[in-house]
């Protein structure tokens, strides 16, 4: 939002505070015509709705608010305003639900919590009342600057929230609440190294603050630092041995380090005590799926759906096995749940992607695409993603990482890592399974360690990646050794190991600077097949480019340009493996892969589908089967809907 837009909004807000409701309503459309940023348009439309309500026109306000939450489905303040409008119309049940929605998307809305408190008292909802009163007590205990910063955070105004929080910390050094809030802002801004430092410091300073410990444990898991997360969870359990939330967090971290038997046993113990926990059933399903027990995983996901028929993650998890087929009754259940008036946004998104997969399996391409499109549109509205920034970041890698930089000696010369990079859904899990079937190679997972090192370099004196060339030999050696040590916990003793984080293609310059002997394999797939497969996939986190056909097409082009650059400045050091070539000539491509990694041929790599190991990506079940060809042409039944993708890629095909 630029200064002019902020000035216009301030004028509207001033008129609103002065009860000039007719002025606000009259001027709002003119102001909206001149605004360009989504945030500014959202605020102006909100002001108009408030003016309608305060001028005694709640019906007009509700009309505008419905469109507002359609365009901004995670805007808590709009739901709060809906609640006030329904109250004015005497619709208490709708008002209560609107206030509940408001607190889900912005838990700092004290007024909405207070309205819920009254509603829960009236309806004698004891448990809900206790939760509301706990949140009210917490919010009212916060200093006003921190309450304001929390509100700004959940309202999506991250930089303003950061500014307020930092100002408060300057005057109140080491305040625990401020440190935790600033860490949460850092996570939203993806400044994970700062967030980790803040939470680690907070836990050290306040060892009895379990909220800080919980936030730190959650961040460690998010960053893929599962050994540290396990340690943190076990420490917390010493003080709270029966805390179900901590036990569930420990089980999640145990899955991360590959201790699947212990994790599964812990999940089953928790569910024996409290079976009506659909999220825990899904978590158990994920652990069983990672262990290769597809039947058990499906049973767990189905149990989650039985416990909560509108729990979208249960259905998406079934769809995400890639082998499960929905029957007509379950499809009907999903349709009913998806169109329910009280379905949560996150559940709605999951249901849309699951219905897309179910209808695609039934050869109903048009109906399937409509659900894929709806799911992607809903997901994209919750993100603040701009593809041009990503394109600029990839262009910066090309500018900063030129051939002379790699002529410098230095770095850690351990030959252990084999990086598999590329776009999601490009066949990287298949390549990992092939290599991990070799007796000298450990398969791990999508490790976050290179991304973490890149993030730490981004906040040093000279902006990353332009500071890569200025790293000393000693710094490169230390960073490379840091990577080797951090990843040791995921290995099982083989001389080599795989890091299959697809987004590492962005950081090949960093990898070769600190680990010059690392092997890098680029998993490549037909552009249309790859992009559409990504568009159909609801990712757990990240991959924000995948929720628009145009964005994913632009991302593919930027990826291809950057990979061409890496091949120019690092000739012969990256192996591109085309997914279609692996399907057409498995043995030949296996030999090519092994030769590049300087590994002797082993038949187990060709028979990869019989290898038993932990796999946590969406392709886990597909790579436990022999090579199949159906994925090469799946997109063709959707060709009529892929115009935006073809336009970006510059191709249209009638294959």
Image (cartoon, rainbow, N blue to C red):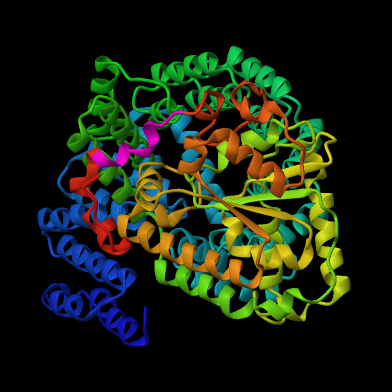
| Quadrant occupied by the C terminus | top left
Magenta range: 628-636
| Quadrant occupied by the N terminus | bottom left
Residue 633 shown in magenta: yes
x then y, percent, for residue 476 = 82, 69
Name the residue at the right extreme: 474
Residue 216 shown in magenta: no
Reply above or below: 342 against 113.
above
Identify the residue at image location x=56%, y=17%: 274
The answer to whether residue 621 is visible is yes
Reply above or below: 442 against 56.
above
Residue 109's image quarter?
bottom left
x then y, percent, for residue 456 = 71, 67
Identify the residue at image location x=72%, y=56%: 199
The answer to whether residue 179 is visible is no
x then y, percent, for residue 17 = 28, 75
Reply above or below: 603 against 172.
above
């Amino acid at each position: 939002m630029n200064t002019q837009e902020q000035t216009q909004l301030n004028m509207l807000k001033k008129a609103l505070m002065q009860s000039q409701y007719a002025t606000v309503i009259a001027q709002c459309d003119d102001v909206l015509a001149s605004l360009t940023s989504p945030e500014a348009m959202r605020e102006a439309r909100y002001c108009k709705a408030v003016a309608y309500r305060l001028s005694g026109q709640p019906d007009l306000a509700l009309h505008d608010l419905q469109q507002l939450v359609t365009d901004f489905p995670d805007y808590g303040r709009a739901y709060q305003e809906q609640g006030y409008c329904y109250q004015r119309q005497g619709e208490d049940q709708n008002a209560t639900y609107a206030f509940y929605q408001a607190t889900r998307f912005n838990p700092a809305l004290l007024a909405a919590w207070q309205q819920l408190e009254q509603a829960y008292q009236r309806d004698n909802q004891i448990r809900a009342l206790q939760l509301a009163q706990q949140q009210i007590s917490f919010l009212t205990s916060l200093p006003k600057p921190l309450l304001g910063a929390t509100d700004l955070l959940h309202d999506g105004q991250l930089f303003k929230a950061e500014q307020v929080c930092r100002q408060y910390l300057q005057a109140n050094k080491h305040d625990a609440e401020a440190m935790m809030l600033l860490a949460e802002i850092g996570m939203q801004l993806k400044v994970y190294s700062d967030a980790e430092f803040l939470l680690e410091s907070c836990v050290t300073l306040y060892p009895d603050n379990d909220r800080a410990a919980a936030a730190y444990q959650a961040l460690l898991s998010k960053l893929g630092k599962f050994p540290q997360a396990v340690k943190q969870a076990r420490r917390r359990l010493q003080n709270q041995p029966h805390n179900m939330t901590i036990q569930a967090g420990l089980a999640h971290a145990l899955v991360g380090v590959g201790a699947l038997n212990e994790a599964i046993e812990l999940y089953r113990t928790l569910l024996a005590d409290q079976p009506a926990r659909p999220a825990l059933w899904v978590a158990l399903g994920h652990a069983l799926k990672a262990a290769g027990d597809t039947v058990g995983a499906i049973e767990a996901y189905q149990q989650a759906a039985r416990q909560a028929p509108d729990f979208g993650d249960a259905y998406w998890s079934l769809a995400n096995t890639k082998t499960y087929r929905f029957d007509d009754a379950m499809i009907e259940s999903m349709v009913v749940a998806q169109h329910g008036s009280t379905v949560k946004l996150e559940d709605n998104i999951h249901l849309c992607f699951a219905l897309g997969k179910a209808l695609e399996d039934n050869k109903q391409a048009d109906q399937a695409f409509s659900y894929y499109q709806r799911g992607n549109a809903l997901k994209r509205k919750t993100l603040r993603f701009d593809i041009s920034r990503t394109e600029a970041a990839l262009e910066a890698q090309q500018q900063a990482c030129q051939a002379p930089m790699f002529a410098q000696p230095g770095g850690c010369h351990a030959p252990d890592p084999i990086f598999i990079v590329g776009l999601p859904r490009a066949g990287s899990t298949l390549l990992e399974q092939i290599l991990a079937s070799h007796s000298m190679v450990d398969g791990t997972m999508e490790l976050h360690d290179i991304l973490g090192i890149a993030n730490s370099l981004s906040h040093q004196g000279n902006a990353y990646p332009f500071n890569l060339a200025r790293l000393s030999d000693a710094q490169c050696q230390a960073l490379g050794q840091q990577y080797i040590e951090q990843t040791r916990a995921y290995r099982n003793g083989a001389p080599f190991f795989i890091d299959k984080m697809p987004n590492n293609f962005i950081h090949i310059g960093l990898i070769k600077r600190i680990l010059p002997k690392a092997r890098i394999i680029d998993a490549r797939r037909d552009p249309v097949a790859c992009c559409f497969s990504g568009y159909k996939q609801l990712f757990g986190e990240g991959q924000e480019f995948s929720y628009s056909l145009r964005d994913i097409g632009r991302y593919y082009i930027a990826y291809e340009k950057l990979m061409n650059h890496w091949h120019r400045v690092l000739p012969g050091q990256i192996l591109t493996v085309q997914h279609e070539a692996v399907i057409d000539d498995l043995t030949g491509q296996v030999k090519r892969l092994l030769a590049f990694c300087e590994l002797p041929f082993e038949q187990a790599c060709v028979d990869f589908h019989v290898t038993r190991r932990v796999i946590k990506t969406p392709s886990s079940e597909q790579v436990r089967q022999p090579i199949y060809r159906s994925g090469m042409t799946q997109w063709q039944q959707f060709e009529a809907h892929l115009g935006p993708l073809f336009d970006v890629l510059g191709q249209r095909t009638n294959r």
